Amino acid sequence: MKEKLLRFNLYLGISVFIFSSILLSLEVPFMKAWFFVCAWWSFILMMDSLNFRRTKSSPLFESMKVFLFMAFLSVFVWLVFELFNLRLKNWSYHNLPPGSAERWLGYFIAFASVIPAMKELSLFFRSILKGKRLALFRLRATPLLLKGCVFLGLASIFLSLTWPLLFFPMAWLCFIFLLEPVNYWLKNETFLKDFERKDWTRFWSWVLTGLSAGILWEFWNFWAGSHWEYSLPYLDFGRVFNMPVLGYTGFLPFALEIFAIYTFLSWVREKLERKILLKTLIFFALIAFYLFVFYLIDTFSLIN
């Protein structure tokens, strides 16, 4: 029964996406506001089914608890970048629903799709690249290299927030430098460990994930009624959809950041597995954080 459901999800996802696209083309007000959300969650259903068909692996159904954790923490991870954007002012939101309750629900559901979608894409690309010779070189993670990466991560945060007009791209690099060494020290999965084994499969699968997700984000955003628009210093030219063409390069390191951040947060989750009270407090603290940042988005990044 479970296998039939997982296979059926491919057709369900395709059907939802086609139906949503038809409603959008008919300019149905609800779909103009919610098309982006419908597109991504139907895509996640499709990719999950494809991954199951290819590898018998389904992030959506292997552990619903882990998947919900992934979606819930996805909101937190994206809101960190929204906080960066309060200083960088690289994007703004337009034509969102006028009601705060609907708009904030939309924020939550849309941001919750980021990590699940990228996880599904990375599994798909890894299954394609598995067994292929993709290594460029072997890299040894020496103590000096690890400490140097942490320094670069901190410097990237400082530079991007202090001189955003010049160093705004560093926001899409800082968490790679910061968390790859931390994950290495904690014995989590890391690209650095892969490079020591001269195995670049995971790295290239996440690079392709970033590129693919970025194109889909911008393509669906371009057609949606509720959408975002960019204003990038010295790169604001040659737009493809709403994104300046060189801006697409930022999706590649962003994907690597997502892998590093989620790997670290998964380690934290495991450490808190039996600490029910602490997990409950963290849950409500995150809800308060989400609402606060939603308010900041409405105040500084929303243009209706």
Image: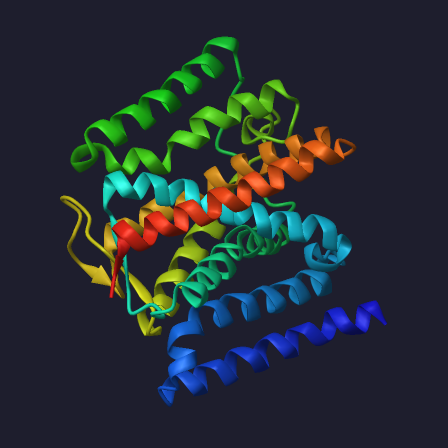
Q: Is residue 284 left or right of residue 154?
A: right
Please name whichever residue, 68 or 39, is drawn nearer the observer in this view of the structure.
Answer: 68
The structure residue drawn at horizontal position 40% and vertical position 45%, both measured from the top left corner, is 252
Q: Is residue 136 left or right of residue 122?
A: left
Identify which residue is drawn at 68% across, 36% down.
279
Residue 242, position in %: x, y? 26, 63
Q: Position of residue 8 (x, y in %)?
A: 72, 76
Where 191 falls versus 297 (above or below)? above
Q: Quadrant of residue 41?
A: bottom right
Q: Position of residue 94 (x, y in %)?
A: 27, 65
Q: Quadrant of residue 250?
A: top left
- Residue furthest to the bottom: 26
Q: Quadrant of residue 304?
A: bottom left
The colour scheme of the drawn protein is rainbow
The image shows residue 175, relative to residue 120, as above or below, that is: above
Residue sitting at 28 percent across and 42 percent down?
86
Q: Is 125 on the left or on the right of 173, as rendered?
A: right
Residue at 51 percent of width and 83 percent of height: 18
| Residue 185 visible in the displayed image | yes
How many numbered discs? 0
Q: Is residue 83 above or below residue 36?
A: above
Q: Residue furthest right?
A: 1
Residue 212 x/y as whole percent: 44, 57
Q: Is residue 134 visible?
A: no
- Relative to the observer, which residue lies in front, 53 or 48? 48
Quadrant where the image shows the N terminus: bottom right
